[in-house]
Amino acid sequence: MRSASPGRVAVVTTSYPSRDGDASGHFVAAGVRELVDLGHEVVVLAAGAARPATELERPFGAEVRWCGGATLFGWPGAAERARAAPWRLAALAPFLVGFVRAALAVGPLERVVAHWLVPGGWPLGTWLAERTRAPLELWAHGSDVRLLVALPARVRHAVVATLVTRAERICFAAHATRTSLCRALPPGLAAELAARSEVRAPRLALPTRGDDAARRAWRELGAGAGELRVVVAARLIAGKRPEMAVRALAAAGAGHFLLVLGDGPERAACERLARTLGVRARFAGRVERSRALALIATADVLVHPAAIDAAPSAVREARAYGVPVIATPAGDVPRWAETDAGITLARDALELASALTQVPRPRASEPTAQKANAEALRVVLPR
């Protein structure tokens, strides 16, 4: 993302942190911070509660303009929110109006960076890039690719053809998502998309934090002395299969404590399941990002039982802190496991349970390792 002559860049996104500690779109914010550090003037056009034009936020030097649409584009994701309450789709229209108003005021641009192929890339990013005659850079994550694959073939082919034609650069968060989209396209268009794109995991911003405070937090949350501290950090939706982690701990037996960081429609069912199976667990809900990372960094193991994924941030964060991971083979996790002995693959709850029994229990005085492989994980550490 480096430019020979830094200028004004517009970042288009439907997910972005709305306050300190908000984990929404944290990888987008990390990319924005990198642009600012490289000397660019950055304006972020984001979905979120619309505010008067005079109330412009400038986190680490980037200007954020909220365009509306918070009813739809919010935790735990637009698809889940629309599925739970279809009326939320009505928020799309005011968001588009708010986006156009904000975009008309951004002025000349050196580049447009759009996150999520739809709607960030098409129609929003392509329209803004065309209007300002600026190069377009696209970032595909996971849910956007799944949405494209689910669309009628003619619509999918038309949208992808437009993006391939207009974009100067297309980045996929995972090989798995690029492959799934290419398989859903005509051979010629798939070949063109493959040739014009690259796979590059989004940036992560990982703060350094002492272990002592986090270990006290584990005790306050209910973890007992000598128990293996197991953490799940995810949106609690069907595709992430949080109930599999609960069943795995039940099968693994006593001596384990499960901490679930995140919220979503599956939370109540998982809490009931944990009580029924007698699993020692604490569901902490949505936790501020710095606190969540500190808890992940001081866990004994992270469990990631997703059925569908791309380049899961929680896995990358745990490995950056030196924490072992037990994960199901979704997205690019199997590819990572080929070169990272700290990732163990498990196909179901019983295999997860078996892997949990193999995790070493650290001595009480043994500090948690915090090793970051910045090159392999593309981690951006705050200065």
Image (cartoon, rainbow, N blue to C red):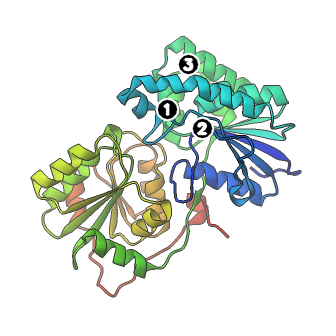
Query: Any mark on residue 116, and which?
Result: none
Q: Earlier in the sequence, mark 3 or mark 2?
A: 2
Tag 3: amino acid: Arg
Which circle, 1 or 3, is nearer the viewer? 1
Badge 1 amino acid: Leu
Query: Which SS class for mark 1?
Result: loop
**Residue 232 horizontal side relative to residue 54, left or right:** left
Question: Which sits in the foreground, 28 or 86?
Answer: 86
The three-letter amino acid code for the residue at tag 2 is Ala
The residue wearing badge 2 is: 47
- Say left or right for 6 vs 318: right
> Mark 3, residues whose alpha carbon is within 10 Å: few (<14), some, or many (≥20)?
some
Evaluate if marks 2 and 1 touch, with contact meaning CB atoms under 8 Å apart.
yes
Residue at 24% across / 45% down in the picture? 268
Measured from the top left, where is residue 92 in percent x and y? 56, 25
- Residue 192 shows in this picture: no
The relative height of residue 166 versus residue 371 in the rendered view (above or below) is: above
Q: Looking at the image, which is closer to me, 31 or 350?
A: 31
Image position of 71 with respect to 328: above or below: above
The label shown at residue 72 is 1
Pointer 3 residue: 156
- Distance from label 1 to label 3 (Cα)? 22 Å
> Where is residue 120 drawn, in percent x and y?
63, 32
Res 359 seen here: yes
- Viewer-closest of 335 and 250: 250
Label 1 packing within 10 angstroms: few (<14), some (14-19), many (20+): many
Per the model, the C-alpha gap separating discs 2 and 1 is 9 Å
